[in-house]
Amino acid sequence: MARAKQNEKAATVRTTSTSRGVRTRSKPALVALTVSALALAWAGVELAGAGPTMYAYGFFFTEFFAGVVALVSLSLTVMMGLLATDRLVLLIRHRVLLQSAHRATGILGVAGLVLHVITKISIGRAGPTDAVVPFIGGRGLYVGLGTVASFLMVSVLWTGLVRVRFAGVGPKWFWRALHSMAYASWPFALIHGLNAGRPAKSWVVLSYLVCVLLVVLALLVRLSVHLGRRSREQHQAAALNKAMAGRPAEESRGLLAGLGRKRSGDEEKSGATREWDGGWAETAATSWSAPAGTVRRHDPGRFAVPVVPEPGTLREPVRAAAARRRRQEEPAPVGAR
């Protein structure tokens, strides 16, 4: 129970200050402050009399260029997000910069998408249901593809904003699969932008086709690098498993041979010690007589150096080896000599 409590992950403590002691502002407070500043600026422009003119220019821009901004931003987002995963040419700082630009263009694209949808609904070129449910408003196939692309764009932006929530939760491929929906939303957005609106010029169509070809080529390169890295890892793992599979048998044979040589050397050394002790005892017995009333000790092994016990081998248990060594080290009876 105590170990389970120790293994529990500590709860994340959110603070409102940095490591330097500076108090940080919350994101909702910053959003509210920005909206208030924009509303105040708009009210000042309206009171100054230039409001209708600015509104007319702003509406014209959003009607004709908000969709273009959304489409170009989405194209840049896909390409920079793909380049940010490169590890062959780019350094770490380059990838970090590309990831920041990737997020910025994604937010800009969704903002342009919102303005594009609002202006098209306000002028009657699309209904409120077309922005929510595709292919039911009678506006055609290309408008429905734009609705699908808008849903996918918002979903991809959401997965990018809540990426921290996926850290350590579930498999790693789950977030990548959700975020990879951008590769599906981009072709839908291209088809919608080139066919649902006003006719595009030839250089615009050609530029989009070049972007698509470059992205497909980059995806193929990324896939080949990933497959090559995976095959190398599998080859290294197989070689390591093969080496580890043949290693224990060789180690066990070498260990058994070493233990056998050590045991034979110890036995020879202990036998020589016993012979030397026995000879010394016999010489001492002939040249020296014990006092009367004393009992002679026939213990030739009392002067032997104790043998350090060695560990058991791999083929016999440790207790059996220790018992066998004790039997070998016991002194022989007097009558047997």
Image (cartoon, rainbow, N blue to C red):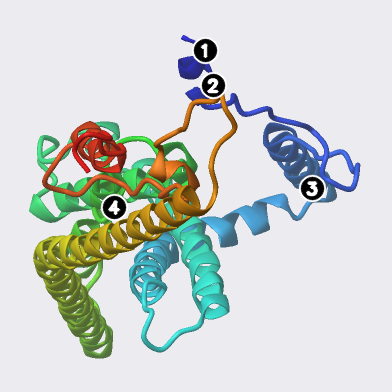
Q: Secondary structure at mark 1?
A: helix
- The one nearer the camera, 155 or 193, is 155
Name which of mark 4 and mark 3 comes first in the sequence.
3
Q: Residue beneath label 1, please?
A: 2
Q: Residue at x 29, y 36 (%)?
A: 326
Q: Which mark is residue 321?
A: none
Quadrant placement of the C terminus: top left
Q: Decide if residue 211 is on the left or right side of residue 253.
A: right
Q: Secondary structure at mark 2?
A: helix
Q: Decide if residue 222 is on the left or right side of residue 110.
A: left
Q: Residue beneath label 3, please?
A: 41
Kindly check if marks 4 and 3 are in contact, taking CB atoms under 8 A apart as contact: no
> Which amino acid is tagged 2?
Gln
Mark 2 to mark 3: distance in Å?
55 Å
Q: Residue at x 30, y 48 (%)?
A: 172
Give the answer, above or below, for where 158 lies relative to 269.
above
Kindly check if marks 2 and 3 are in contact, taking CB atoms under 8 A apart as contact: no
Name which of mark 1 and mark 4 comes first in the sequence.
1
Mark 2 to mark 4: distance in Å?
32 Å
Q: Residue beneath label 2, please?
A: 6
> Which amino acid is tagged 4?
Arg
Q: Residue furthest front?
A: 292
Q: Nearer the viewer, mark 1 or mark 4?
A: 1
Q: Residue beneath label 4, please?
A: 176
> Which amino acid is tagged 1?
Ala
Label 1: few (<14), some or many (≥20) within 10 Å? few
Query: Where on the picture, by quarter, is residue 23?
Result: top right
Kindly check if marks 2 and 1 are in contact, taking CB atoms under 8 A apart as contact: yes
